[in-house]
Amino acid sequence: MTAVPPLTDGDLTLRLLRHDPKVIAFDVENGAPVGTVEVRRTTPGVGLVVWAVENSDAAQRALRLVTEYAFGELGLERLQVEVDPSLHASARVAVRSGFRREGVLRGAALVEGERRDVAVYGMRIDDPRPETVTGWTALMDSTLPKKRVIAHVVVRDTGGRVLLCQVSYKKDLELPGGVVEPDEDPATGASREMEEELGTALPLLGVLAIDWLPRWEGWGDAVEILYDGGVHDPSLIDRLQPDGFEIRSISWHAPDKLAGLVSPLNARRLPMLLDAPDQLHNLRNGSPITS
């Protein structure tokens, strides 16, 4: 077996237990044996870290020692940890050891005949370490909720009608706009979507409403911002150019004629917004939030 000196962190010691081309394993001692930690080579340059340690503090310190050994002495470039999402203590050990949450493999593990999800945490050799500010904030960012932001534009004509789009992926008529991209502010996202969908980005005059949308038909929850696209002559519709792919056609619709044409969400909130366009509407699922 390859001679490897003990890895130490204060009173914690890792002693080599196994060293072969596929697995490098260590006994973990903290005054007395408290478990094991190992690196399993999976693909070139990549290893899977597995541990069985009695307490979280010792596990975290052991993982930090073994990851630096894997990057330094073993020449690995990426390490990965796989955790049952219900094992919160193990997830905390992974994060505090420098592993960023990267996603969930649904039903990837078979445990006693039951399909279980697997949360994947990863670390690259060039990632800032958890004791640095950027390293710690990147770790926290990987674990915090990622909520979608949607930006739609409410465009009105001089007759009080609203501009709606017939989209290719559902029957309900929809407002222009869409999902805001990463690193894009919502107003820019709304303008970009209008430019892509209708060939013109109308000036945004302000915010008409902020709405929270619960989970719906496979979508996760989201925050939606509805911008005021202004009041225009009805002939505006002749100057807009639907992309023909996502947007098949556009048309003006009176607020009292929306039922059955739009989603129940828009049927609730659009007449209210069109009736009071000078007010900022604070909504929850299309209904006003009251105290």
Image (spheres, rainbow, N blue to C red):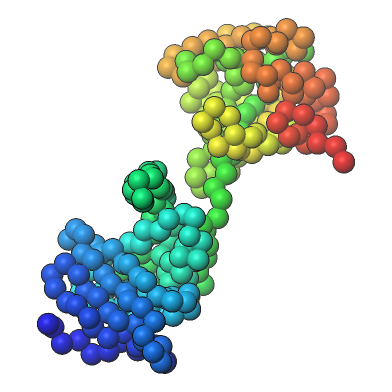
Left or right relative to 252: residue 78: left
**Residue extending farthest right:** 291
Query: Which quarter of the figure is the N terminus placed in?
Result: bottom left
The spot of residue 65 in percent (x, y) is 35, 80
16 or 210: nearer the viewer: 16
Image height check: is 43 above or below 214?
below
The spot of residue 222 in percent (x, y) is 61, 38
Image height check: is 18 above or below 226?
below
- Quarter of the view holding residue 206: top right
Left or right relative to 241: residue 36: left
- Residue 249 visible within the image: yes
Residue at 51% of width from left, 16% of height from top? 170
Left or right relative to 2: residue 117: right
Image height check: is 121 above or below 134?
above
**Residue extending farthest front:** 112
Residue at 27% of width from left, 79% of height from top? 26
- Quarter of the view holding residue 121: bottom left
- Residue 232 visible within the image: no
282 or 254: nearer the viewer: 282
The spot of residue 159 in percent (x, y) is 77, 9
Residue at 68% of width from left, 19% of height from top? 264
Query: Which quarter of the figure is the C terminus placed in?
Result: top right
253 or 195: nearer the viewer: 253
Image height check: is 245 above or below 68?
above
The spot of residue 163 in percent (x, y) is 65, 15
Number of dots carrying numbers: 0
Residue at 27% of width from left, 89% of height from top? 6
